[in-house]
Image: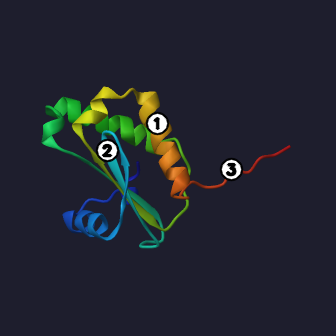
Amino acid sequence: MKKINIVKSSEEFTKIIKETKPYRFKGYLVFIAHKIVDHYEFGISVSKKVGKANVRNRIKRQFKSIIDKNNYQNAFKCIIIIKKEALEKTYKEIEFELNECFTKANILEEKNEKN
């Protein structure tokens, strides 16, 4: 993820979490706020309850790589809060669920198919 596409301040995290309803999955929550900025931003939060630093960093890297695979529309902010149950899932399961969530939230760009 590029630095411009990262939510960093705790004020932004709390504002988005309080104002939006989450998409709930076993292991993580996804909060999406539309039309806040002119570009898209993602924020990832992992609790210390998940494990030691290397475990938390590994799961964050997995989520970031899934996020980087897609093209997104502009004008939204997304916060992902990862819980301990996410460690029980495989990379493919997390990828499938996140892509389904992004499709439901209508933040993925349309793919232009050439015949």
Circle 1 packing at 10 Å, graded few (<14), some (14-19), many (20+), is some
Q: Residue furthest right?
A: 115
Q: Position of residue 30 (x, y in %)?
A: 37, 52
Tell me what residue is drawn at x 28 percent, y 63 percent: 17
Residue matched to label 3: 111
The tag earlier along the polypeptide, 3 or 1, is 1
Disc 2 marks a residue whose amino acid type is Tyr
Tell me what residue is drawn at x 30 percent, y 27 percent: 88
Q: Quadrant of the C terminus?
A: top right
Tell me what residue is drawn at x 31 percent, y 66 percent: 16
Mark 3: secondary structure: loop
The tag earlier along the polypeptide, 2 or 1, is 2
Can you tell which quarter of the image residue 40 is in? Answer: bottom left
Q: Position of residue 31 (x, y in %)?
A: 36, 58
Residues at marks 2 and 1, CA–CA distance in whole angstroms? 12 Å
> Does residue 16 sit above or below 105 in this rendering?
below
Can you tell which quarter of the image residue 9 is in? Answer: bottom left
Q: Report the mark closest to the observer, 3 or 2.
A: 2
Residue matched to label 1: 95
Question: Is residue 60 left or right of 34 when viewed as pictured?
Answer: left
Mark 2: secondary structure: strand
- How many numbered marks does the figure carry? 3
Residues at marks 3 and 2, CA–CA distance in whole angstroms? 27 Å
Front residue (pair 56, 50): 50
> Does residue 103 sit above or below 14 in this rendering?
above
Disc 3 marks a residue whose amino acid type is Lys
